[in-house]
Amino acid sequence: MNKDKASFGRSKPGPGKTGRAKPQTAEQAAAEALAHPGLAARVAAAAIIGDVIQGGHTLDEKFAAEAAPSRLAGLAERDRGLARSIATAALRRLGTIRLALSQLVEKGLPRNCGSLEWILIAGAAQILFLDIPDHAAVDLAVRAARLDPKSAGFANLVNGVLRNLIRRREEFLEQSDPLEDDTPHWLAARWRRVYGEERAQMIAAAHRDEPTLDLTVKSDAQAWAEKLGGRVLPTGSVRLAAHTPIPELPGFSEGEWWVQDASAALPARVLDVKPGERVLDLCAAPGGKTAQLASAGGKVTALDRSAERLKILAANLARLRLEASIAVGDAAQFKAEPFDAILVDAPCSATGTARRCPDVPWIKKPGDIAALAAIQARILDHALTLLKRGGRLVYCTCSLEPEEGEAQIAALLRRNPDVSHEKIDPIALGLPPQAATPDGDLRLLPDLLPDPDPRQRGLDGFFIASLKKLG
């Protein structure tokens, strides 16, 4: 089986082996969905899994408010949360799930079976990785299959496969390998080549852990950690102990903090903005780094090409009672008077965010990295034209790929002899010495912050470099 493909094989079913049931009418299907609590959430989760794997959509896109009419219409907030939990678990452990199903459906899936594959994946995610009763996972998967005219005839197949999965659960979990099974082949090969077998395994294992929330606070991190039931990380971020709806947490409505992964909070700290400095935040949305720069007293211009994402940034700044000039535009073409400091959080493959965004490894393709690296180079070269002599520029990506990090900066320095490469001290940022590269940049890997509790360890993979334009 090629685990990088969505399907675990398809074939025509043999006569009498599918347990075909008569498909329901649309009215009957709607009535059944209303009659069985949790069924609509399972149907939505299965559909969204298919949208991500087949259509290349992100989970955030599918669960955004504007996506509600297509997949999540009418779902209560609790069911939306359940649907997201199922879809997230399915994508986080997609390789393990597909390997198990390939052994349970030896002849492959029937042709023209509608949403059968996604229903099986959603059901398997619940059985293997979520705290959901087995009987509920099986029963509602069978009912979900009956709602789709194309998969209705295979409801008994769903029942049999998932019941066999329950019986063999421990076997499948024990044989699962994070790098070999839950990482696409092309990414696993890259990480082995770049980081070596042992570190590649550690990265892949870290991506299996469901993270909790990290917060950046305006002031007194220790006091807010105590109020929120969290702890202060060595880097200064506050890490929560459990998931609670964000708006219900103390300090949210008062604008005392914002959600931001511990890694993502470091580039603004490296830039070290002083009050009154003119600062440009390129590719700024959704605004966590903009908030840091404004909170430090910078006169910030936040630029992004997405007007919709900038609406989110503006709303975040309003809640936080912070100010910045907001501009819609292309980071490789923006024109303005020179700035004292520039933060370039460049568009990238985002392979370092798989802990929080488990869809990323499955929707990216090998060719994306070279294409994105070319965009990053154009943005960087243009950003230097917007920087004052003696000004500072911090470049970062949430990618684990050297083409988007170390190689990008090396190439920029070859093209620009008037730029100096400033070394970053990891110790001053609360990081271990091994976070620094030989050239003095930061290379943060997902396994960098160990902890006995899986939900308390790790952070997003990031690359951060500091540059200065010579006077």
Image: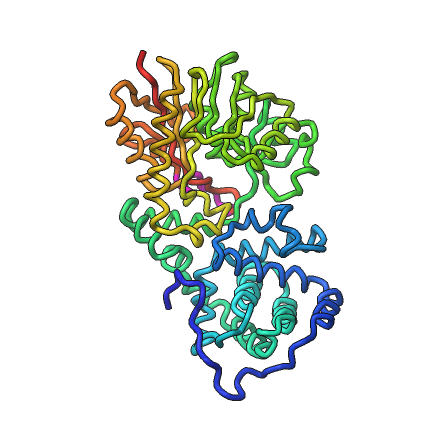
Camera-nearest residue between 179 and 354: 354
Q: Is residue 345 a member of the stretch shown in magenta?
A: no
Q: Tell me which corner region of the image, top left, top right, bottom left or bottom right, holds residue 444.
A: top left
Q: Residue at x 66, y 42 (%)?
A: 245
The single residue placed furthest to the bottom in the displayed view is 15
Q: Residue at x 54, y 16 (%)?
A: 297
Q: Main secondary structure of the magenta part?
A: loop
**x, y percentage for residue 92?**
49, 54
Q: Tell me which corner region of the image, top left, top right, bottom left or bottom right, holds residue 468.
A: top left
Q: Work out whether residue 135 can be spotted.
A: no
Q: Is residue 446 a member of the stretch shown in magenta?
A: yes
Q: Is residue 391 above or below residue 451?
A: above
Coloring scheme used: rainbow
Camera-nearest residue between 54 and 168: 54
Q: Residue at x 46, y 40 (%)?
A: 459
Q: Is residue 374 above or below residue 280?
A: below
**x, y percentage for residue 57?**
51, 52
**x, y percentage for residue 42?**
63, 62
What residue span does the magenta drawing correspond to?
A: 445-454
Which quarter of the rendering shows the N terminus?
A: bottom left
Q: Residue at x 45, y 31 (%)?
A: 330
Q: Work out whether residue 208 can be spotted.
A: yes
**x, y percentage for residue 4?**
39, 60
Camera-nearest residue between 342 and 240: 342
Which quarter of the rendering shows the C terminus?
A: top left
Q: Tell me which corner region of the image, top left, top right, bottom left or bottom right, holds residue 398.
A: top left
